[in-house]
Image (tube, rainbow, N blue to C red):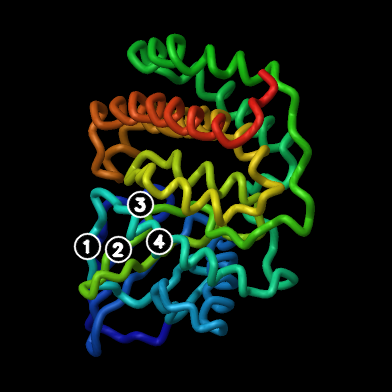
Amino acid sequence: MGFRPPFSLTPLMGGMNNQGYRFRHSTGEAFLKHYRSPDRGQREELIFRLLEVHEISQVPALLALNLPLQLGLFEFVEGEVLSSASREDCAQALLLLRQMQTLPGREVPPAVDGCLSIREHWRSIESRLEQLQPLLNSRALAVWQEVWRPLWERLRNRTLPADVAPGECLVSPSDYGFHNCLRRRDGNLCFFDFEYAGLDDPAKLFCDFFAQPRVPAPLSALTDFWDWLPPASRPRTAWLWPATCLKWSGIVLRRLCHPEDLQRASVTTEQQMNKLGWLEGRRREVEAWLLQRTPSPDC
């Protein structure tokens, strides 16, 4: 990437999908990201170049990329990791989403793990859960059997909604939320991790944003995001919501089976178990909220 010694690398904790480093060199510092695969770096480069061309500044600057080495070099953002988020923070997140819709859709590929086909998305969730069950320890298995397996059985009997229409797709950051941002010194948020980004169902974006348990989005912002959703996607959002919570329960449970994942994210087993309780409460709260605004999904 053109840098010569002396320089230093300091590993940064908290990343679940990639390894990040604070890269200090003779003229300054940067954030060095090692991708698990070149495809992830290629996708992130595409999105960041489009954001740069359209002068969208709520993200760090991409400085350099070396795909054969699976390395990306970004502006080092001096900021604070969020432990909680406010409705005002959600307004900043929504602003970035609005700005991203100015990107030319013809240049944006479908999101990785997107939800353009409801049937395929549901099959993906079920496949993950089927692979997960044999790995669960006794404590995690008890929670799964008591809370999440009955929900899975209920959802399996529902009629699938229509797929998202091509013109209904939005440009989505994908793994979007306050777990992937920093608060700059001036109070503005800087969002990162766009390696799964692309065209996706707005209903999936809504559900993932409010189901993500690491740094939860406040329920006070539900109406703001709901009003932003295309009206045609709202009934599908009500169908996807409990399925999304089920998916996130699988993500939380899977990490319980891999202590190295918890260590990398600086999370204890007890904190991870608490997320399962939070997810069940959040599922019920938002489901009740959605039922006041959409017809009841076929159960």
Q: Which residue is mark 1?
A: 80
- Work out how far the residue at label 1 is from the one at label 4, CA to CA, in angstroms: 18 Å
From what the image shows, is residue 120 above or below residue 185?
Answer: above
Nearest the eye: 14 or 56: 56
Residue 43 figure quarter: bottom right
Q: Residue at x 43, y 78 (%)?
A: 57
- Where is residue 95 drawn, in percent x and y? 46, 67
| Res 182 label | 2
Q: Which residue is mark 4?
A: 91
Q: Which residue is mark 3?
A: 179
Q: Amino acid at mark 3?
A: His
Dot 2 or dot 1: first in sequence order is 1
Q: Amino acid at mark 2?
A: Leu
Q: Residue at x 51, y 81 (%)?
A: 52
- Work out how far the residue at label 4 is from the one at label 2, CA to CA, in angstroms: 15 Å
Q: Residue at x 34, y 59 (%)?
A: 89
Secondary element under disc 3, as helix, strand or loop, is helix
Q: Are marks 4 and 2 in contact (CB under 8 Å)?
A: no
Q: Quadrant of the N terminus?
A: bottom left
